[in-house]
C-alpha cells in the first residue's frame, strides 16, 4: 500500500509568551513542533506499512526550516518526503493550498492519503477534505481506527458522547486522523541517523505547473483580517503549583463561594 | 566561529527532550521519594539509541561524538536529573574501556551496554581515597594466571545493578611514583568476591543507584587487565577528561530546568497586585541565570567540540566542569528562592533540583580539584 501523509510544523504555544507582529503570530522565539494530529497520522501510516508492506511518503508545505517536520517523520519510519517550498504559497487560503497539494499529489499513485483532523495553529480542519474534493476522491474525517481491506478501507469515526461510526471507502481515499488513534513512537537515534542519508524532494510552484498569480493572498477568496491575543480579564485568579495543589486550591475556592454543597 | 548545531544534532535534541518529557515527568517524584528507578525506562532509552551514542559503530554504538552524548544528557537532566542519571550513567566506564580495553573486552561489554542488556559501573573511589585516587588501597595481586582483588569501594554508581565493573586497584603499591601504582581490571559482578550494598539517604539524584562495594578475594583472569599494567592513574585522568564533559551537560540541563521553572512561576504568581515577573529583583535573577547557563554551555560545547576533533584540553574541561556545576547550584538556589514556600516542598520540581544540584560540584572531580587543574595550566 502506498500511503501519503501531509504533515505540518506548528508553533508550540502552550507556555509561550505570544506576540503579534504585523497581523501574524511572531514566530521568532517560538519552538516549532509537529502538529499533534499529523504525528498520529504518520504513526498510523508507518504501522499500516509495517504490518502489510508498502511505502509512506510525507509532504509538507512551508519555509526552509520546516524541513525538520519531514525529517522527524522519516526518522519515525516513513520512506520518502517532499517539501513544497515557495514564497508564492504564502498567504494562500485553505482552498488554494488544497489546489497546491492536489497538483503535487495527483500523479503519485497513492492508495491512501492521511492528514491530521486539524492543525493546532489555524484549526481549519479543511486540508484533507478540500484535497479530497480537488482530487475527486472519497473521504472520511475524525478517524480513530483504520482497517485496510481489498480495494477499500474501513474507517471508525469518532462522534460525540463516545459514539462512533464505521464507514467503508473505496481506495484511493483521503482520511483525516484524530488524536488518540494510536500511541506515536518516540524518534530514535537510529531513525535520525537513517535520515542523514536520505534526500528530501524540494518542489516550487513552477515544478507543479502552478502560476504564481493563482497562488497566495491575491488568489485566495478568504483573506486574513487580524489576529488578537486573549484580552486580560478582570478578576481572574491564577492558581499555581502542582496538579494536586491546584486542585486543592480550586476546591477550596469553590467551597468558599458556595459552589460545592 | 559557528555555534549552531547541525540538522542532525537539532533532531537529536528534540528527540531526547520528547523522550524525557514523556517518560520522566510523571515518575520523577515517585523515584525521588522511594530512592528507586524503573529500569524499563533505561531499556526503552536503549531501544531508541539514546544510550552510548559515543560508542564506536564497530561495538554497536552510533559512533557519534561526546557533543551529541552531551546534548542528550542536557535534555534528560533538564527534565529530571535523577532519571537522566538512571538512564545515562549505565555506560560509566565505557569511555575508559573504549580508549584502553582489548578488542575482546570491548566486544564483550560495549554492545551489551548499547543494547540495554547490561549496565556497567566503575569502582574507583574508596573510603579513604576520594580526590586523591593515587591513595586507593584496593590491591590486585597476581596468582598464577589470575589476579586476586581485595579492598572496598565507596559511592559506586550502579554498584548493585551493574553486570560489569571496572576496578581501580594497586598492582605496584610500593612504586615510588604514585602515578604508577595502579591498574584497571574488568570484572563481572556476579562472581564470588564482589558484594555490592545499596546506599540510601542520598541528598539528590535519588533515582540513581549508589552502592558500596566489598571486594574479597575476587579472582579475575590475567586478561581482565585493561591496557598496560601500572597505567591506571593516567587512564583515569584520560577517562575523567571525557566524563567530566557529561557532568557539564548535566549541570547545564539542571540549570535550564531551574530557569524554566522560575520563568513559569514568575509569570503565574501574583504578589502585591502584580506578577512576580514584574519585580526587578526577580528579573535580574533570571537574567543572571540565563547568562550563566549560556556561558556554561558555550564553555562545555567548546571542550566537547575540541574533544571530538581529537584535542583533549585538560584545563578547558576543568574550567567547564567547575563553572557549569557552580551555575547549576546557584540556579537551583535562586529558583527555590523565587518559589518561596512552595519551592520548599517536593511536589515542586525546584526542590528536587536544589537537592540534585550539589553532587555536580562533588563527583568526578570536586570544584576544588578542578580549580587546581586550571591553576596548574597557568602557574605550573
Image: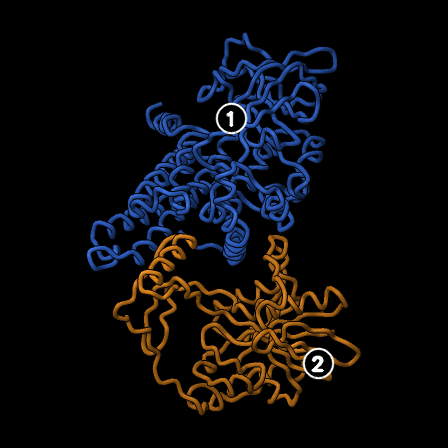
For the point 58% across and 15% down, which residue is it?
Answer: B151
Q: Which residue is mark 2?
A: A109
Marks 1 and 2: same chain?
Answer: no
| Image quarter of residue B60 | top right
Looking at the image, what colour scheme do you see? Answer: by chain
Q: Which tint was used for chain B?
A: blue
Q: In the depicted view, which residue is nearer to us: A183 or B359? A: A183
Q: Which residue is mark 1?
A: B155
Q: Is residue A114 above or below residue B295?
A: below
For the residues labelled 1 and 2, say whether their Cβ atoms are less than 8 Å apart. no
Work out which quarter of the rendered image holds the C terminus of chain A and state it.
bottom left
The image shows residue B323 at horizontal and vertical percentages of: 36, 37
**A23 left or right, relative to A87:** left
Q: In the depicted view, which residue is nearer to us: A128 or B110? A: A128
**B327 left or right, relative to A10:** left
Q: In the depicted view, which residue is nearer to us: B15 or A245? A: A245
The chain letter of the orange chain reads A
Q: In the depicted view, which residue is nearer to us: A200 or A217? A: A217
| Image quarter of residue A194 | bottom right
For the point 39% across and 68% down, which residue is it?
Answer: A27
Q: Which mark is residue B361?
A: none
Give me the chain letter of mark 2: A
For the point 59% across and 57% down, which residue is it?
Answer: A186
The image shows residue A37 at horizontal and vertical percentages of: 55, 70
Work out which quarter of the rendered image holds the N terminus of chain A and state it.
bottom right
Amino acid at each position: 500500500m502506498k500511503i501519503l501523509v501531509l504533515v505540518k510544523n506548528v508553533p508550540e504555544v502552550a507556555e509561550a509568551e505570544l506576540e503579534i507582529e504585523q497581523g501574524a503570530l511572531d514566530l521568532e522565539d517560538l519552538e516549532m513542533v509537529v502538529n499533534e494530529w499529523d504525528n498520529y497520522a504518520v504513526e498510523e501510516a508507518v504501522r499500516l506499512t509495517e504490518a502489510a508492506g508498502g511505502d509512506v511518503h510525507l509532504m509538507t508545505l512551508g519555509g526552509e526550516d520546516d524541513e525538520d517536520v519531514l525529517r522527524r517523520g522519516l526518522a519515525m519510519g516513513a520512506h520518502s518526503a517532499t517539501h513544497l517550498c515557495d514564497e508564492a504559497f504564502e498567504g494562500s487560503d485553505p482552498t488554494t493550498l488544497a489546489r497546491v497539494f492536489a497538483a503535487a499529489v495527483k500523479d503519485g499513485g497513492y492508495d491512501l492519503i492521511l492528514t491530521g483532523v486539524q492543525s493546532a495553529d489555524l484549526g481549519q480542519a479543511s486540508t484533507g477534505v478540500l484535497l479530497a474534493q480537488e482530487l475527486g476522491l472519497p473521504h472520511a474525517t475524525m478517524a480513530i481506527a483504520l482497517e485496510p481491506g481489498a480495494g477499500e478501507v474501513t474507517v471508525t469515526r469518532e462522534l460525540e458522547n463516545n459514539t462512533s461510526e464505521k464507514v467503508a471507502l473505496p481506495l484511493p481515499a483521503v482520511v483525516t486522523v484524530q488524536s488518540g488513534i494510536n500511541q506515536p513512537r518516540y524518534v530514535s537515534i537510529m531513525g535520525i541517523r537513517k535520515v542523514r542519508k536520505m534526500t528530501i524532494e524540494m518542489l516550487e510552484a513552477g515544478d507543479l505547473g502552478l502560476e504564481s498569480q493563482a497562488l497566495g493572498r491575491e488568489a485566495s477568496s478568504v483573506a486574513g483580517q487580524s489576529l488578537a491575543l486573549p484580552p486580560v480579564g478582570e478578576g481572574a485568579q491564577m492558581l499555581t503549583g502542582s496538579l494536586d495543589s491546584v486542585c486543592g486550591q480550586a476546591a477550596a475556592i469553590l467551597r468558599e463561594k458556595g459552589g460545592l454543597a | 566561529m559557528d555555534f549552531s548545531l547541525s540538522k542532525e544534532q537539532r533532531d537529536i535534541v528534540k528527540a531526547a527532550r520528547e523522550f524525557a518529557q514523556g517518560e520522566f515527568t510523571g515518575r520523577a517524584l515517585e523515584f525521588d521519594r522511594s530512592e528507586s528507578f524503573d529500569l524499563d525506562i533505561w531499556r526503552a532509552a536503549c531501544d531508541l539509541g539514546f544510550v552510548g551514542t559515543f560508542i564506536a559503530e564497530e561495538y554497536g554504538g552510533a559512533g557519534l561524538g561526546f557533543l551529541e552524548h552531551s546534548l542528550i544528557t542536557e535534555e534528560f537532566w533538564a527534565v529530571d536529573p535523577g532519571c537522566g542519571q538512571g538512564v545515562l550513567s549505565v555506560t560509566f566506564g565505557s569511555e575508559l574501556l573504549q580508549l584502553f580495553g582489548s578488542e575482546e573486552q570491548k566486544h564483550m561489554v560495549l554492545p551489551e551496554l548499547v543494547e540495554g542488556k547490561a549496565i556497567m559501573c566503575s569502582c574507583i573511589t574508596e573510603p579513604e581515597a576520594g580526590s586523591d585516587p593515587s591513595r586507593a588501597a584496593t590491591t590486585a595481586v597476581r596468582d598464577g594466571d589470575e589476579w586476586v582483588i581485595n579492598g572496598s569501594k565507596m559511592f559506586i554508581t550502579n554498584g548493585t545493578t551493574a553486570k560489569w565493573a571496572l576496578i581501580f586497584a594497586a598492582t605496584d603499591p610500593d612504586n615510588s611514583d604514585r602515578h604508577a601504582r595502579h591498574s584497571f581490571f574488568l570484572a563481572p559482578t556476579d562472581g564470588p568476591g564482589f558484594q555490592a550494598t545499596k546506599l540510601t539517604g542520598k541528598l539528590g539524584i535519588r533515582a540513581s543507584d549508589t552502592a558500596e562495594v566489598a571486594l574479597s578475594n575476587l579472582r579475575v583472569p590475567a586478561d581482565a587487565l585493561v591496557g598496560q599494567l601500572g597505567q591506571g592513574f593516567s587512564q583515569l585522568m584520560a577517562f575523567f577528561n571525557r566524563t567530566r564533559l557529561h557532568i557539564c551537560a548535566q549541570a547545564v540541563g539542571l540549570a535550564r530546568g531551574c530557569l524554566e521553572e522560575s520563568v513559569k512561576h514568575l509569570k503565574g504568581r501574583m504578589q502585591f497586585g502584580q506578577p512576580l515577573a514584574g519585580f526587578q529583583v526577580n528579573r535580574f535573577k533570571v537574567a543572571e541565570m540565563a547568562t550563566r547557563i549560556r556561558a556554561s554551555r558555550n564553555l562545555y560545547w567548546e571542550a566537547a567540540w575540541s574533544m571530538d576533533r581529537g584535542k583533549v584540553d585538560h584545563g578547558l574541561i576543568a574550567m567547564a566542569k567547575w563553572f557549569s556545576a557552580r551555575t547549576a547550584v546557584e540556579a537551583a538556589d535562586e529558583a527555590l528562592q523565587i518559589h518561596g514556600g512552595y519551592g520548599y516542598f517536593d511536589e515542586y520540581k525546584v526542590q528536587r533540583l536544589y537537592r540534585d544540584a550539589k553532587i555536580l560540584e562533588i563527583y568526578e572531580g570536586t570544584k576544588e580539584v578542578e580549580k587546581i587543574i586550571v591553576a596548574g595550566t597557568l602557574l605550573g
